[in-house]
Image (cartoon, rainbow, N blue to C red):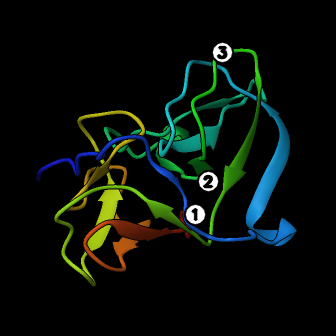
Amino acid sequence: MADIAKSGTPSLATYLPPATAQTAGLLAGEDLAAGDACYIKSDGKVWRSTGAAANPAAKVRGFAAMATKAGEAITLFFDVTFRYGSGLTPGADYYLSGATAGALADAASTGGTGPIAYALDTTRIAVRRSTY
């Protein structure tokens, strides 16, 4: 399993994300980078998801569209398109990384058993929430 490298700073590629594809009014529990897969911890704050174990941290509730410092407001996006990497394989599924919190990988991990993104072309991915 290999992590998918971010190329530059990931950004929303969806022109106008519908309100139904975002969760606003949240606070970051830790520093987050653009493109990080995130979950909402029991403390009500947003943290980077990790597929290291099959636990609540492996649930992806959305993706950070911009870098956010701990304690700042954040909106999570899902069912949208991100400019994410380079050299991606169109149609390839991506999973929650078990090695790097917030990252995507090219194969399933212990906690990230289902795909949470797929490549639309060599630079863009379509992202979604966990289905379990």
Q: Which residue is mark 3?
A: 70
Question: Label 2 is placed on what type of residue?
Answer: Gly
Secondary element under disc 2, as helix, strand or loop, is: strand
Residue 104 drawn above or below residue 89: above
Q: Residues within 10 Å of mark 2 (few under 14, many from 20)?
A: many
Instruction: Check the image and name the residue furthest to the bottom.
Output: 91
Quadrant in the picture for residue 98: top left
Query: Which mark lies nearer to you, 1 or 3?
Result: 3
Secondary element under disc 1, as helix, strand or loop, is: loop
Q: Are marks 3 and 2 in contact (CB under 8 Å)?
A: no
Residue at x-position 81% and y-position 72% = 18
Q: Is residue 67 left or right of residue 122?
A: right
Q: Nearer the viewer, residue 38 or 34?
A: 34
Residue at x-position 25% and y-position 81% = 90
Q: Which mark is residue 62?
A: 2
Q: CA distance from mark 3 to mark 2?
A: 17 Å
Q: Which residue is mark 1?
A: 129
N-term-proximal mark, 3 vs 2: 2
Q: CA distance from mark 1 to mark 2?
A: 6 Å
Residue at x-position 36% and y-position 80% = 120
Question: Label 1 is placed on what type of residue?
Answer: Arg
N-term-proximal mark, 1 vs 3: 3
Question: Label 3 is placed on what type of residue?
Answer: Ala
Q: Which mark is residue 12?
A: none
Q: Are marks 1 and 2 in contact (CB under 8 Å)?
A: yes
